[in-house]
Amino acid sequence: MRKSTVAVMLSGLVFPGAGHLYLKQWGLGIVLMAVAASATYFIISVSLSIALDLSAKIQSGIIPADIDAITNLVSQQLSATTQSINLATTILLMCWLIGVVSVYWQGRALEKPDTVAQRP
């Protein structure tokens, strides 16, 4: 299998920057991984804090165990953080796109035969 194919699969299916590390492009790989990991951490931490807060309120009896009441509260809490979650999601998707496209170009450039060295 070609290096570019393996690198694209790593960046596209595993995590942004993984393909760059495979191609030994350390700088860009580490930057993409750090930015993508930060965005992922933010999204998960906001979602988890909302879920834990609502869970505690349901268990303590502040919120009735009614699906409509819970749905309304989830919608209210998510609407308060929509802009920041959308920004983090956009950053994560851009890292993934940049990672896949960039690693494909870099992998293809490494696979090209050296035409200057082949000429007599």
Image (cartoon, grey):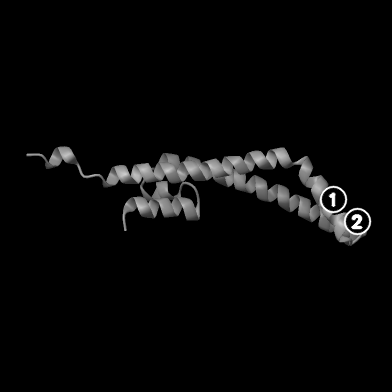
Numbered label attached to residue 109: none
Q: Amino acid at mark 1?
A: Leu
Give the residue displayed 82% in from the left and 46% down from the top: 76
* Image quadrant assignment for residue 56: bottom right
Numbered disc in front, either 2 or 1: 1
Q: Position of residue 69 (x, y in %)?
A: 88, 55
Under circle 2, the secondary element is: loop
Check disc 2 and report the residue beneath it: 63
Give the residue displayed 66% in from the left and 41% down from the top: 86
Q: In this rendered view, identify the residue nearer to me: 35 or 72.
A: 72
Under circle 1, the secondary element is: helix
State which quarter of the image contains the C terminus: top left
Query: On screen, 80 above or below 44?
Result: above
Q: Position of residue 100 (x, y in %)?
A: 44, 46
Precedes in sequence: disc 2 or disc 1: 2
Check disc 1 and report the residue beneath it: 73
Q: Amino acid at mark 2?
A: Ile
